[in-house]
Image (tube, rainbow, N blue to C red):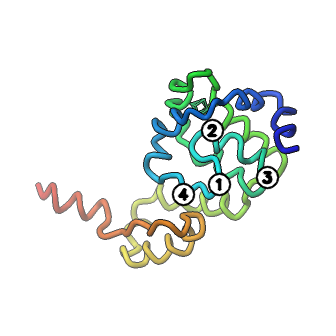
């Protein structure tokens, strides 16, 4: 039944021609950095991010389609020419149209954008406070197989140390 959901789509159905060679996973900068466990699904990497929302639920798994730089390496490598990075965009569009995206995450990203655009706000928080905040916001999404990276010094203080003149 879930395969038929994918087959019924206008664009994403071409993902069904996947021969499971794994080439897209091996070139994906996201997959290479976070590993397969972080996806929390049977199919990981770019092809997993395309088909899992259709197979296991758009509401629960649409975030996989958003976790991509859209660099297109997967599309270049795919031997059966599946336009993976374009299909990720169609998944994003469908998730938004269907109202299945995480509203809380969108709010966090808006706040993140405001903070990133104002260096003084970033500098206000000590590394310990940043670690605490990131731990609260991302612990669940990060998965339980890896520990979160830790802030030690701000970029500005590192820059000052390494470029004193
Ligand atoms: S590269 Fe193409 S055929 Fe190979 S696993 Fe990825 S989507 Fe499937």
Q: What residue is disc 2 on?
A: 47
- Disc 4 residue crowd, few under 14, some 14–19, many 20+, Cα 10 Å: some
Q: CA distance from mark 1 to mark 4?
A: 8 Å
State the SS at label 3: loop
- Say above or below: 135 vs 51: below
Task: Pick the residue in front: 80 or 150.
Answer: 80
Q: How many marks?
A: 4
Q: Which quadrant: the N terminus? A: top right
Residue ID for mark 3: 57
Q: CA distance from mark 1 to mark 2?
A: 11 Å
Q: Are marks 2 and 3 in contact (CB under 8 Å)?
A: no
Report the residue marked by disc 1. Answer: 41
- Residue at 47% x, 53% y is 34
Residue 25 vs 72, above or below: the answer is below
Mark 1 closeness class: few <14, some 14–19, many ≥20 residues within 10 Å: some
Real-space CA distance between mark 2 and mark 3, rounded to the nearest whole angstrom: 15 Å
Dot 2 beta carbon under 8 Å from ligand 1: yes
* Residue drawn at 45 percent across, 42 percent down: 29
- CA–CA distance in space, label 1 to label 3: 12 Å
Residue 118: where, in percent of width, then height? Answer: 45, 59
Quadrant containing the C terminus in the rendered view: bottom left
């Amino acid at each position: 039944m879930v395969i038929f959901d994918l087959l019924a789509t206008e664009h994403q159905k071409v993902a069904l021609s996947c021969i499971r060679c794994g080439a897209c996973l091996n070139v994906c900068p996201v997959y290479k950095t976070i590993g397969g466990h972080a996806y929390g699904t049977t199919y990981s990497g770019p092809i997993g991010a395309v088909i899992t929302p259709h197979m296991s639920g758009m509401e629960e798994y649409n975030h996989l389609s958003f976790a991509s730089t859209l660099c297109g390496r997967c599309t270049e490598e795919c031997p059966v020419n599946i336009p993976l990075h374009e299909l990720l965009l169609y998944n994003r569009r469908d998730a938004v149209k269907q109202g299945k995206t995480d509203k809380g995450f969108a709010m966090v990203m808006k706040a993140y954008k405001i903070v990133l655009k104002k260096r003084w706000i970033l500098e206000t928080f000590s590394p310990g406070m940043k670690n605490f905040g990131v731990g609260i916001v991302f612990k669940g999404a990060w998965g339980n197989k890896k520990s979160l990276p830790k802030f030690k010094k701000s970029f500005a203080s590192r820059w000052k140390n390494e470029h004193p003149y």
